[in-house]
Image (tube, helix red, strand yellow):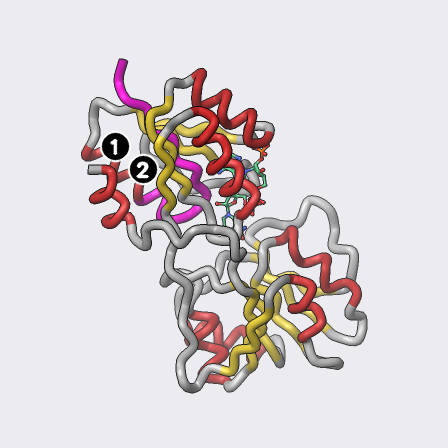
Amino acid sequence: MNETILILGGTREAAELAARLVMTRPDARIVTSLAGRTKDPAPLSGKVRIGGFGGAEGLANWIAENQVSTLIDATHPYADAISANAATAAAAAGVTLRRLARPPWMAEADDRWIEVSDLEAAVDAVPSGATGFLALGSQYVSAFSVRPDCRFVVRMVDVPEVPLTFDAEIVLGRPGLDAGAERALFEACEIDCLVCRNSGGAAGYAKIEAARALGLPVIIIARPAALSPGHATVEDLLAALG
Ligand SMILES: NC(=O)c1ccc[n+]([C@@H]2O[C@H](COP(=O)([O-])OP(=O)(O)OC[C@H]3O[C@@H](n4cnc5c(N)ncnc54)[C@H](OP(=O)(O)O)[C@@H]3O)[C@@H](O)[C@H]2O)c1
């Protein structure tokens, strides 16, 4: 029976890892699991399964039924529920667990970061009367509905299935890769502060650079404390897999 490696994905790094493993381990079955949040996910190398497992127990069952030898948690650094399930399921099923997580960004001298511990604290930190740009997953945005004293511009990949519960302007699209374009967007929307998470990686960094260039405060939500830092790069993880 050939080896099966299950990658919990949903990130660019997970896609890169799947492509590398398909190339370097032609005899292995490489499966990427997606939660199914994105309507039109980018194509992935290897096999793909979509949808929740039904908690840690469901994941452990899937691992056993599919004879997975290695579980790789390459989910987003803030996807703490699936990461906790991965740890529990790997222990229960007796398989090796590896984690791949981009290192967080570090503030530079000109950055005006307001670091907060969680979403609730981020909601409180938006100055009264401000226009905030919410660069957050769609599931976190409704928390800002308790701030009718502020105006919000929300960036989303897809049109929300359930309309927002408050009056916010939606900008559709993925995070801009170009700091100049992000800056132009912030200026056009008359943004006073950016609210985001410390996701790390190159793809989302342009907004941080744009905020720095405009001297805007960035309310930045800290990473879930319970999660291990894991391997910082695909290269490190591949080396650890041997
Ligand atoms: N959080 C973000 O901002 C963010 C950003 C970019 C991409 N993503 C990706 O989007 C997915 C969902 O993120 P989240 O923050 O909603 O996760 P989460 O809160 O940690 O997970 C909630 C539930 O969604 C299911 N799930 C999550 N990731 C899954 C995966 N890769 N495969 C199968 N089921 C998965 C699990 O359901 P069951 O308990 O039923 O198994 C999990 O308990 C993750 O794959 C993540 O990598 C998230």
**At which x and y percent is residue 166?**
78, 61
Residue 145 lies within the magenta run = no
Question: Do callouts 2 and 1 mark residues in contact (Cβ within 8 Å)?
Answer: yes
Type of residue at label 1?
Val
Neighbour class for label 1 at 10 Å: few (<14), some, many (≥20)? Answer: some
Neighbour class for label 2 at 10 Å: few (<14), some, many (≥20)? Answer: many
Tell me where the magenta segment starts and ends, as one range.
1-16
**At which x and y percent is residue 40?**
50, 40
Type of residue at label 2?
Ala
Mark 1 residue CB less than 8 A from any atom of ligand 1: no
Q: Residue at x 48, y 22 (%)?
A: 62
Q: Residue at x 46, y 77 (%)?
A: 210
Label annotation for residue 22: 1
Residue placed under numbered mark 2 in the picture: 18
Residue 103 or residue 94, whichever sits in front:
94
Residue 221 or residue 165, whichever sits in front:
221
Tell me if residue 197 comes above or below residue 99 in the rendering. below
Element assignment for label 2: helix
Residue 131 is left or right of residue 84, and the answer is right
Q: Quadrant of ligand 1?
A: top right
Residue 10 lies within the magenta run = yes
Q: Residue at x 32, y 24 (%)?
A: 4
Residue 185 or residue 108, whichever sits in front:
108
**At which x and y percent is residue 94?**
40, 26
